[in-house]
Amino acid sequence: MSIGSVHDTNEWSEKFFALLMHKIEAEEPFTIVRYGDGELTCIMHAKKGGGGVNYDGDHYSSELGHLIQDSVMNPIIAENFFYALGEHCHQIGLVRDLVRDKKWNASLSFQDAFVFVHAGIDGRLQKLVDLCNERHSIFVAPEYLQKLPINFDNRVVSPDHNSFTKKGEIVAEIAQHLGEVENSIVICALGMSSIPILKELYQKFGTRHTFIDIGSVFEPYVENGMYRSHFDKIKTELNFEYDKRSARRNRQAVEKGSLFNDGGGTYNSHRRRKKERKKRMQKAVQSDKNS
């Protein structure tokens, strides 16, 4: 598919984003991994033994290059596992070169890797922010991104660079926070390392939880965020006021000792809905065991 600019939204991207949001609302777990020029360059550098860094400062290491290459050459074929590729990787010849070198799976079906960028530009990303506020959610990112004012239930701090070297520790910490029966939304901002980490998370927990390789869309909303050219195109900035009011109500409800009774509901309705949903799911699981 050819489009004028990879940063311009399009019907293909909009439909894909709408599908992902529908799945979250319906508590249908899915995983999405995204490939851009950095990931494809890393595959190329694997042959040379590594060398160089991408814009984020992640090394084009041989080990990571082989992990990314393996993810496409031995793909996960499932309805709830999505591969997404940046159109510019075709335009600048990276896909062509990898196909020539037999390091790319040309038969693999890809969605638009800029799906969250487009949603962040025109305001549709607010839907994902609101869902993370309302549902059980986990944020996995470097320290500087952890000040993002979204009401994540848990936060996992990753290294600033080359998170794949700590893949086992990151996966284990995420596993500790996943809901027992409730579908958790896990947002990962891990650069190129997202691919091998999310692949392992899917293989272990993909039937129950949602794992999203979010990319750089939250960078403009934190201090010291890495600049991207698509930031200049943002038409509608994200609104975090919902979370601020919610956090204040949460503290007030706890102080009053009425978190889940009628009074607590006045202060903390979204938390009450979370708990009620969890109870329903626990009853359903117990019913299945008894039948």
Image: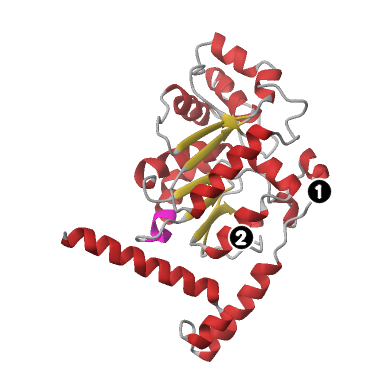
* Residue in the foreground of this view, choosing between 249 and 213: 249
Location of residue 52 with respect to 159 vertically, above or below: above
* Residue in the foreground of this view, choosing between 123 and 140: 123
Q: Is residue 178 magenta?
A: yes
Question: In the image as oriented, which residue stretches furthest toward the right?
Answer: 232
Q: Residues within 10 Å of mark 1 (few under 14, many from 20)?
A: few
User: In this orientation, does residue 191 appear?
Assistant: no
Residue identified by numbered label 2: 130
Q: Main secondary structure of the magenta part?
A: helix
* Residue in the foreground of this view, choosing between 176 and 65: 176
User: Which residue shows up at 35% across the image and 60% down it?
Assistant: 181
65 left or right of 288? right
Q: Residues within 10 Å of mark 2 (few under 14, many from 20)?
A: some
Q: Position of residue 193 (x, y in %)?
A: 54, 39
In the image, the segment drawn in magenta is 174-179
SS at mark 1 in the image: loop
* Residue in the foreground of this view, choosing between 180 and 265: 265
Instruction: Identify the image quadrant of residue 74.
Output: top left
Question: In the image as oriented, which residue stretches furthest toward the top?
Answer: 100
User: Which residue shows up at 64% across the image and 32% down it?
Assistant: 12
Which amino acid type corresponds to the residue marked 1 in the rendered image?
Answer: Lys
Which amino acid type corresponds to the residue marked 2 in the rendered image?
Answer: Asp
User: Which residue shows up at 70% across the image and 41% down it?
Assistant: 118
Q: Position of residue 66 (x, y in %)?
A: 48, 26
User: In this orientation, does residue 166 appear?
Assistant: yes
Where's the C terminus, which quadrant? bottom left
Instruction: Identify the image quadrant of residue 2.
Output: top right
224 left or right of 105? right
SS at mark 2 in the image: helix
Residue identified by numbered label 1: 235
Question: In the image as oriented, which residue stretches furthest toward the bottom?
Answer: 256
User: Which residue shows up at 24% across the image and 64% down it?
Assistant: 286
